[in-house]
Image (cartoon, grey):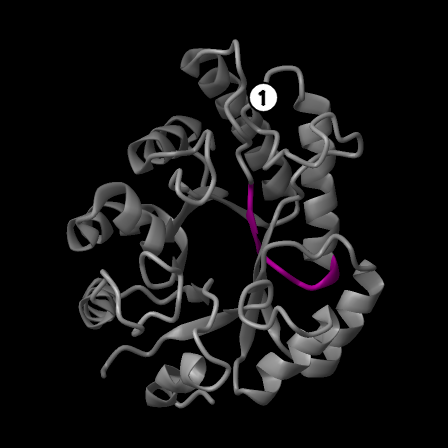
Amino acid sequence: MPFSAKFAANLSTMFDNADFTRRFQRAKELGFEAVEAQSLYHLDPKDLAAVKKQTGLEVALINSPSSGDIDYFGGQAFGLACIPGQEIEFHKSLLKAIKYATAVGCKKVHILAGLKQDGLGEDDLYTAYKQNMESAAECLEEHNILGVIEPICFQVKEKYFMDTFPKAISVISEVGSSNLKLLLDVFHLHMLERDVETGIKKYLKYAGHVQISQAPGRREPFYPGEIDYEKVFALLAEMKYNGHIGLEYTPSDAVKGLAWLKRFQIV
């Protein structure tokens, strides 16, 4: 296959039975050069910096914290960006993400949007979200970090505000910052629009990061399912995508779930 992929092992999904710092070592042992993570905030940034230095792995992407310093949502928040009145806590969460990203040399942060709130209309949520993305883009620019936003299907997170690709593109276009791009997750693209090929052709130009997993079960890409990853990789090669591809999947088997990577000289 002519496509030279830069895969990033997702530490939160691929190695969920191991101590988190051990997951870095496991990814290195398997031949990965980069990793990503959904959340690292239960760990000390100094410890993360040490294991990152020890393994030499690039940290390609981390998520922003689910909540701010004060958790007004009892652990049920999935970001704060769309919620009016949470601007201060959102900014605190962004600064925390920047602190951790800087500690591990990460240049991309997925900014969680938050959940739709009872009593608030789409316009109110959109306005709050856009304003927070504008301030976030300015802050990220100061630290030379790229923010990415990800449409997520309701099967994974009900009531998630960023629930369509057109909405994400609208925000990115209106904010107009080179420090705000799309996180194009092929799984969510399939679940939301079904036509993956058309979606990639339409949205890849906005993307700062790509993630993959098979649908509907979020297994390894070549596990039996609904997405043809031969076509996906061929299209990414044709469109000359050269960024990281995050492997945000749960292996179907400890051995078989990684065997597909052999074709890319990994594992």
Q: Which residue is mark 1?
A: 83
Q: Is residue 209 left or right of residue 62?
A: left
x, y percentage for residue 216? 32, 56
In the image, is residue 193 above or below residue 43? above
Residue 175: image quadrant is: top left
Q: Is residue 105 magenta?
A: yes
The front one of 53 and 224 is: 224
Q: The N terminus is located in which quarter?
A: bottom left
Residue drawn at point x = 59 percent, y = 63 percent: 12
x, y percentage for residue 251? 46, 73
Residue drawn at point x = 59 percent, y = 28 percent: 135
The front one of 101 and 11 is: 11
Q: Residues within 10 Å of mark 1 (few under 14, many from 20)?
A: many
In the image, is residue 200 above or below residue 27? above
Q: How many marks overall?
A: 1
Q: Which residues are magenta?
A: 103-111
x, y percentage for residue 39? 65, 54
